[in-house]
Image (cartoon, rainbow, N blue to C red):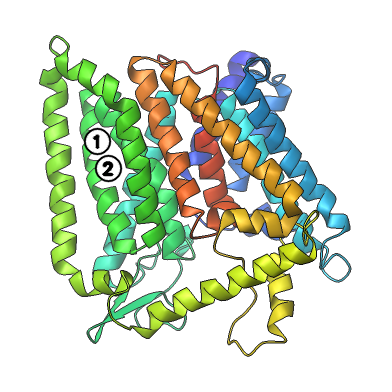
Amino acid sequence: MSRIIRPLNALAVFIAFVLTPVWLRIPAAYALSPLYIGRFLLLIPMLIAIVLWLIAGLPGLTSLRRTLWAGMWAALLLSYALWGFFSQSWAFMSASKPEIAANAALQFGIVALFALVTASGVLSPRRLLLALSLSLAFNAALATAQALTQGDLGLRALGEFPFSPRSRGASILIADGLRYVRPYGLLPHPNILAGVLLPGLFAASALILGDRSRFLRWFGVAALSLGTAALLLTFSRAAWLGAAGGALVFLLLALPVLCADLWGRGASRSLLPTLVASAALVGAVFIGFVVRYTPFISARAGIGEESLELRSVSDRIVFTNFALRAIRERPLLGVGVGNLPWRASDYLRDEFYDLQGDYVHQIYLAAAADLGLIGLALYGGALVCGMIAGIRAVRASRGVERTVRAALLSAALAFMIIGLFDHYPYTLLQPQTAFWGCLAAALTPSFQATA
């Protein structure tokens, strides 16, 4: 039976990672849950992976429990998910709209279980890198085409949102009288697209540095170059910072492997050409972007007084104040998982802002406002223990395994940096899955680089 279940489980995890940049919702999936989360295409392979893992007897869980920091990560992650379920009883909207807390609790519960499945090592690291790189190549090509054509490509069957520079509510930059509509990919906002592209960028980098196949190394070069272009074209400042911070950590962690390969016998003959090509292509993409889009870069950097950029900053300040207010009112329990936007909407009744209720653009404040200081301790503890477990796993690894772990851990760190400026790594299924999935894969004790 395990010969059948294990490959199917690995395939489900593979498909789930491929679908992390896809928002597509299908009516047929509604049977999985009447809640909002119930119709996401991504939910189907995630649930299949969880169910198969349970049927197989939770393989890999024993190794996870025996590893101190990884075991603490798993315990805190599940505790935070359970705390979210408990919060339904005291949620701000529990009386009139109980489905709000139920949806958010179920969503994170599924993500937490999927992270445990990933941490069990059912999918080999090479195939995980391939899944992320394939997803990056497709979605980056799509996003780049959207940016160049300044509109959607009509891919409604894939869930593409219609948009153009004239669309109401479209994410548009204005500078020196010019208008630029940011690409959405297959997601509802360019910032979310930028975030979910990051794991693929680090995966492609790991393919370049560590894969034994020359074809996959050159595929990594192409995916990295195209992904860099797409990331820049999203004009997501938080993702740019996340990418920079993650890249620095990745280079520091992977440097021993890189030096060993360059100085090893014959290794430099296969590695140097791909390194030179990737550096040249990424450099050319960056220079071309700066030359072509200088006015918009200046506007996003806060140079000038473009009203759209000033409004973006002021809105974030408002919701930060609302989150702090909610924490002061209910410091231990919070307003209930998923309920912060509704509490903010209630605050807005007494204000004169032209806004609708939303999350604070900071995942740690969001966790504290939703589930109180107890929830923040569980959430932050899971992140800290996960990062410690990941770093220890990287330091204990050698060769290709070290490169793969470093790439996945750097992707998780990039999401943590993004979380200082945006809320989607905490609130939305797709980036949540990528975030916790990458961290889980980096720290798994049953990692087999030759699988």
Decide which of 27, 400 is in the foreground and name it. Answer: 400
Which residue position holds label 1? 219
Decide which of 217, 233 is in the foreground and name it. Answer: 233
Residue shown at the point (46%, 15%) measured from the top left? 448
Residue 224 on image: x %, y % = 26, 43
Residue shown at the point (59%, 82%) measured from the top left? 355
Residue 179 on image: x %, y % = 28, 81
Q: Can residue 34 be seen?
A: no
User: Marks 1/2: CA distance?
Assistant: 6 Å
Residue 145 on image: x %, y % = 27, 62
> Which numbered dot is residue 371?
none
Which residue position holds label 2? 223
- Neighbours of disc 2 within 10 Å: few (<14), some (14-19), many (20+): many
Residue shown at the point (74%, 64%) measured from the top left? 328
Say what secondary structure mark 1 lies in.
helix
Looking at the rendering, which quadrant does residue 142 occupy?
A: bottom left
Say what secondary structure mark 2 lies in.
helix
- Which residue, as the protein is rendered here, is positioned at the far front? 328
Q: Amino acid at mark 2?
A: Ala
Q: Are marks 1 and 2 in contact (CB under 8 Å)?
A: yes
Looking at the rendering, which quadrant does residue 334 occupy?
A: bottom right
